[in-house]
Each structure stands twice: as structure tokens, then as C-alpha cells.
Amino acid sequence: MSRVHYSAASYSHVGMVRKINEDACLELTWDGLWAVADGMGGHAAGDYVSSLAVDSLRQLPLVDGLEDFTQALRDTLARVNRAVREETLRRGVAMMGSTVVVLAARGDRAVGLWAGDSRLYRLRDGCIERLSHDHSYVQELQDSGLLNEAEARVHPRGNIVTRAIGVEDQLELQAVDVQVKPGDTYLLCSDGLNKTAEDHEIADVLGHADPYQVVRSLVHLGLTRGAPDNITAVVVKAN
């Protein structure tokens, strides 16, 4: 296993419009685990689900191998999904859910897992790449060539996700294998960031060396644009 050292920082803000922060994030750099969850279904439900997801991941015992670690993450999020489905019935509400994006690393290998439209980006040699693919209504329109990125950002149905914790009986996570190189920067964020800032703007901020300053600057960028939604960012730098 190659020696790659990680440093990270996280920051979450309620934004300029919402009264409740339904986002939650996880920064366990020592364990090689980072996550962002964006709750849905109103403040009585969304913040419950996102917090449950993050807290459940936080309580995972340390697992050495990346494959075993990834399976443990999948099993944990599947249990959370079942618990949320049961709680939705118990409360008698229409929907409780949360998007989730996770980055798990062991040495120079990592795995990204996600459901929904919270994103995983990588900045390498000054170029930004989105490693995740949104599970959302507007992403499907983009994939069909009916919308471009700018139109998708302001689409009135831009909040509709097609996969998330709590939405279906079985949670379907998408995964990407990542070969980490020293100098890489990874960003996990809720859609409150990428709907207010363009990818090239995010890339400019990610290039700075200090993860703490990066997450503060990213959230500040969203706030200067009015921040109609909660904004959460986790930045991971590989050295």
C-alpha cells in the first residue's frame, strides 16, 4: 500500500433562506472516511435522516482492507435505509430521505459511493472532474440532451432526486474506484454549493493548500450568491 497522507476539513452552513440545516457531514481523516448527506422531507424528517446516516457511518468499527471497508459502508447505509423506511411509516408522513456521498480511502486507493445529487469532485493538476453522476430528474434531462448545465442549475424541478436513502425499499448506491495521487484534492458537497457556483469557480478555490480555508471559501462563495439552500463541503487533500 503506497504511503499517501490525507488532510481534510469540513464546513456546513444553513444558508440565507432556510431555517433548519438538513445537511450533515463526516470528517474522519484518521479512518480514511468522509461523507456528506443532504436531508429531504422537511425539517422534522430531513435532518433526522441525514444525521442518522452520518452518525451510523461514524460508529463503524475500523476495517483495514478497502473492499471489506466498502462492503461495511454499503451494509451500514442499507440498514439506515431500512430504519428510515420504518420510521416513515411510524410517523405517517409521505417521505423522509437523504442523499449521501461517501469517500473511503486506504493508502492510494479509494472508493466513492453515492445516491442522489450530492457530489464528489477531484482536482488534479489544476483540472476539475466530477467523479459522481447525479441521480436526479434534471440530470436525466441533461443525459438526454434536453438541458445544458446552466439550464439544469436553475430548472424549477432541480430538487427532484431519483435515488436517495429512504426513497425505495432497497438502497441502490453507485460506486467509483479512485486511484489517488499525491497532490489530488477531493470535494464532497451538497447541491447547495454546486447550484450556486460553477465547476470552474469551485476549481479555483480547491487549488488553495489549506483545506480549512478551502471549505470556508467555498461556503462563502455560495453565501454571496444568496444561498437558497443549505451548503456543506468536505475537502480532502492527498499528500
Image: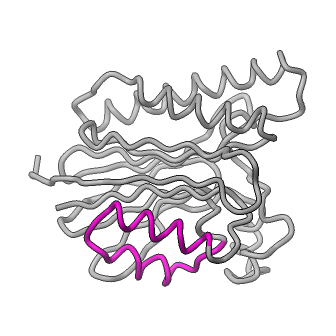
Percent coordinates x, y for residue 155 in the rendering: 81, 73
- Of residues 10 and 59, the one nearer the viewer is 10
Percent coordinates x, y for residue 43 in the rendering: 77, 39
Which residue is at 54% across, 55% downward? Answer: 232
Which residue is at 15% across, 54% downward? Answer: 4
- Of residues 19 and 74, the one nearer the viewer is 19
Say whether residue 210 is magenta. yes
Residue 193's quadrant in the figure?
bottom right
Describe residue 149's horizontal placement relative to residue 7 as left or right: right
Describe residue 29's horizontal placement relative to residue 193 as left or right: left
Q: State the predominant SS element of the stretch in magenta.
A: helix
Percent coordinates x, y for residue 203 in the rendering: 42, 78
- Of residues 188 and 140, the one nearer the viewer is 188
Q: Identify the image's colour scheme: rainbow, by chain, secondary structure or one colour.
A: one colour
Q: How many marks?
A: 0
> Magenta stretch?
196-223
Describe residue 232's horizontal placement relative to residue 30 as left or right: right
- Of residues 199 and 65, the one nearer the viewer is 199
Question: In the current view of this chain or complex, which residue is farthest to the top?
Answer: 90
In the depicted structure, whether residue 215 falls above or below residue 76: below
Which residue is at 40% across, 27% downward? Answer: 72
Which residue is at 67% across, 80% downward? Answer: 149
Residue 231's quadrant in the figure?
bottom right
Describe residue 216's horizontal placement relative to residue 89 as left or right: left
Residue 82's quadrant in the figure?
top right
Percent coordinates x, y for residue 218 in the rendering: 49, 69
Say whether residue 81 is magenta. no
